[in-house]
Amino acid sequence: MGSGGGRGRAVSGDAEITRFRELLGRRLGWAYTDRDAGQLAPLLDERARHRRLSRDDYLHRLAARPWEEELTALIERLSITETYFFRHGEQFRALREEALPERLAARAGQRVLRMLSVACSSGEEAYSLAIVAREALPGGNWLIDVLGVDANPAVLRQAEANHYSPWSLRETPDDVRERWFRPDGAGYRVAEDAARITQFRRHNVADPDDEVWRPDRYDVIFCRNLLMYLTPAVAAALIARMAAALAPRGYLFLGHTDSLGSSPAGLELRHNHHAFYYQRTVATVAPPAQRPAVARAEPVHPADEVYTKAVVLLGEERFADALALIDEHSPAPQGPGFSAPSEGPGAGSGRAEQARHRLLRGVLLAQSGRIDEAIETARRMIDDDGLDPDAHQLYAVCLEGDGATEAAVGQYRLAAYLDTDFALPRLRLGQLARRHGDERAAAGELEQALALLAAENDRRILLFGGGFGRIALTVLCRSELDACGVRR
């Protein structure tokens, strides 16, 4: 395949993919696992062919010295760019009603407000920050600066073009749309008052940049759904940079799966408007090179060690060990299902904890081949809370595994109906529709799944992803859509 390959090395395909993953981690800071091989193998083949090199020679060239042009091509191919204006509205409510009033009061003497959108993609988040800041100003004569950074030059060009389809405004309130967006052909542009205070810059978070990460600079930083894609070392360094770059008492908003635990260095956890976020403490935060790296917390309840260990075992496909651990330390009586918790003080949190354990146990039962017990667990969960989408998803998986496909479809539909952001039932509905020859219905479900997968909850991917990671599921969804003949 192509030129080169004359150094006499014979490297297996698996070893080449492992090396490719390691190079992506080293050059870009992006983390991949064995589950992502289905995406990385064809990409490696494609890029090696494009460069007229063998796989081995391509990897050797990628490792040997900087190759900016090729890294740019890889970034454009591997980036997950799905976003929209005012995504996760509860965080913007917390920004509008809690964070910005505090920061505006703190900055009243300087009349300067600076905000940063990390991994800003095509700009919707950065422009959303600018709109909220403009609306929050107590008066004129303020300097507002919103910076969006991303490693992907293609999406930055879209951001700078400031032209968006109606789909990008799907969560934008009508009054905000009327005030801050201007119709332009088949789409919209952000109004000049917000657009002129928003700038974009190419930056890969794996690399230092003294201008972006100036100490004590930003009042607010948004960095949502990025940490989970980074290697632990790069994620830790980024967290340290962000903490140091925040002004004292500045605010950091992360994605729902990017928990740092309850007391990360230099930051304190806040909770308002159903949103978790962080505020920098008053004490000086040392830059990354002067203090230990911040450990990355797993996206699970930090106080529940049993649950956390069982989840890790599930990820390692040690289902019997995980099930034994859950059964030994469960907070509720055992059996195919758990008994309902008692009412009283703290009962709400107890029910939530019990529900997590029950769901995990049901998944482990199904993975262990104990389908009848898993079905009974799912039924009891639905009896306790018929509006729980995870319970219906578990029931659907069990029914399908038991050969009751039609009944499973009904449960998948219920799961998707009860949580419109739940990607995995949509993906499975699309696959089942394809199996039955209904390409049109399949395409509709798969398109919705593809739009939702980038933001799908990590816990749900682990529980219901069939052993595949987010990237592999995205590739699978695209492959299924291509097979339907859908133009996207």
Image: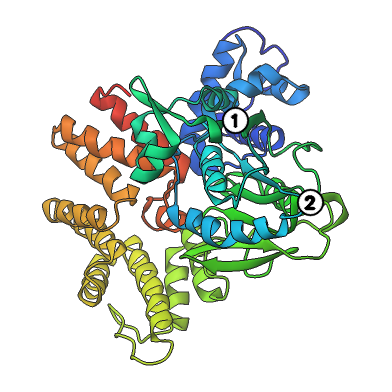
**Residue 216 in sight:** yes
SS under mark 1: loop
Q: Measure how far apart labels 2 and 1 are at the Cα level.
A: 23 Å
- Which mark is nearer the camera, 2 or 1? 1
Give neighbour class at mark 2: few <14, some 14-19, many 20+ (Cα, 10 Å).
Answer: some
Q: Which residue is mark 1?
A: 196
* Residue type at tag 1: Arg
Q: Position of residue 134 (x, y in %)?
A: 56, 44
Q: Residue at x 52, y 65 (%)?
A: 300
* Residue type at tag 2: Asp
| Residue closest to the far right | 290
Q: Position of residue 267 (x, y in %)?
A: 70, 63
Q: Which residue is mark 2?
A: 216
Left or right of 102 in this view: 428: left
Above or below, 123 against 277 in this view is: above
SS under mark 2: loop
Left or right of 50 in this view: 109: right
Q: Residue at x 28, y 78 (%)?
A: 337
